[in-house]
Image (cartoon, rainbow, N blue to C red):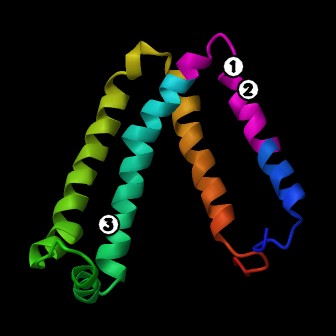
């Protein structure tokens, strides 16, 4: 509520107003199926994309040598140069491979034989929803977005 200069109650009400209709879907007779699809997509796509983004952000936007030295100063486990290579190249390559294989599998056959419309709505819809919400929460109010 500090970020948007709003009353805590109003912010809580806004969160509930967004979350309630989404959560209500899971209480229906088909709720388990919707949950199953959303869970699959968040794990197969959302987490992989988030991990890939974090590897790229940390691997290329931070000074990895200084970051490694800091981690070595506060940890019992020493990180060598291999850690930088793994963070910059190996892990993103593996995550990108996993992402491509997951997209390929979803294109060839829908998850558990669910209708394509259901996996599209619950899968891509969930990812787009969280991307939009993440963007709206990230951007600063009043910032010129032109």
Seen at 73% across and 40% down, the residue is 19
Q: Quadrant of the C terminus?
A: bottom right
Q: Position of residue 93 (x, y in %)?
A: 20, 58
Q: Is residue 138 magenta?
A: no
| Residue 100 vs residue 54, the one in the foreground | 54
Q: Secondary structure at mark 2?
A: helix
Disc 3 packing (10 Å; few <14; some 14–19; many ≥20): many
Disc 1 packing (10 Å; few <14; some 14–19; many ≥20): few
Q: Secondary structure at mark 3?
A: helix
Please tell me whether the stretch drawn in magenta is mainly helix, strand or loop: helix
- Kindly report which numbered mark, 1 or 3, lies closer to the viewer in this rendering: 1
Answer yes or no: is residue 141 visible. yes
Query: What residue does disc 2 label?
Result: 24
The vertical placement of 114 against 84, above or below, is above
Disc 1 and disc 2 in contact, CB within 8 angstroms: yes
Q: Marks 2 and 3, how far apart in space?
A: 35 Å
Q: Quadrant of residue 22?
A: top right
On screen, residue 62 versus residue 24, left or right, reads left
Q: Marks 1 and 3, how far apart in space?
A: 37 Å
Disc 2 packing (10 Å; few <14; some 14–19; many ≥20): few
The vertical placement of 70 against 77, above or below, is below
Answer yes or no: is residue 119 visible. no
Q: Position of residue 35 (x, y in %)?
A: 55, 25
Query: What residue does disc 3 label?
Result: 55
Q: Position of residue 91 (x, y in %)?
A: 21, 60
Residue 78 got which mark?
none
Query: What residue does disc 1 label?
Result: 27
Disc 2 and disc 3 in contact, CB within 8 angstroms: no
Seen at 45% across and 35% down, the residue is 41
Seen at 44% across and 46% down, the residue is 46
| Residue 114 vs residue 16, the one in the foreground | 16
Q: Which residues are magenta?
A: 17-34
């Amino acid at each position: 509520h500090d970020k948007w200069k709003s009353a805590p109650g109003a912010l809580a009400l806004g969160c509930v107003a967004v979350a309630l209709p989404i959560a209500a879907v899971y209480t229906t007779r088909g709720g388990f199926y919707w949950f199953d699809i959303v869970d699959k997509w968040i794990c197969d796509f959302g987490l992989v994309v988030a991990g890939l983004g974090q590897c790229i952000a940390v691997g290329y936007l931070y000074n990895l040598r200084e970051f490694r030295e800091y981690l070595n100063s506060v940890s019992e486990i020493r990180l060598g140069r291999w850690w930088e290579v793994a963070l910059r190249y190996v892990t993103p390559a593996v995550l990108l491979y996993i992402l491509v294989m997951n997209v390929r599998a979803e294109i060839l056959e829908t998850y558990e034989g669910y209708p394509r419309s259901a996996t599209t709505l619950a899968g891509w819809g969930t990812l787009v929803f969280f991307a939009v919400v993440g963007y709206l929460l990230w951007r600063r109010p009043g910032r010129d977005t032109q």
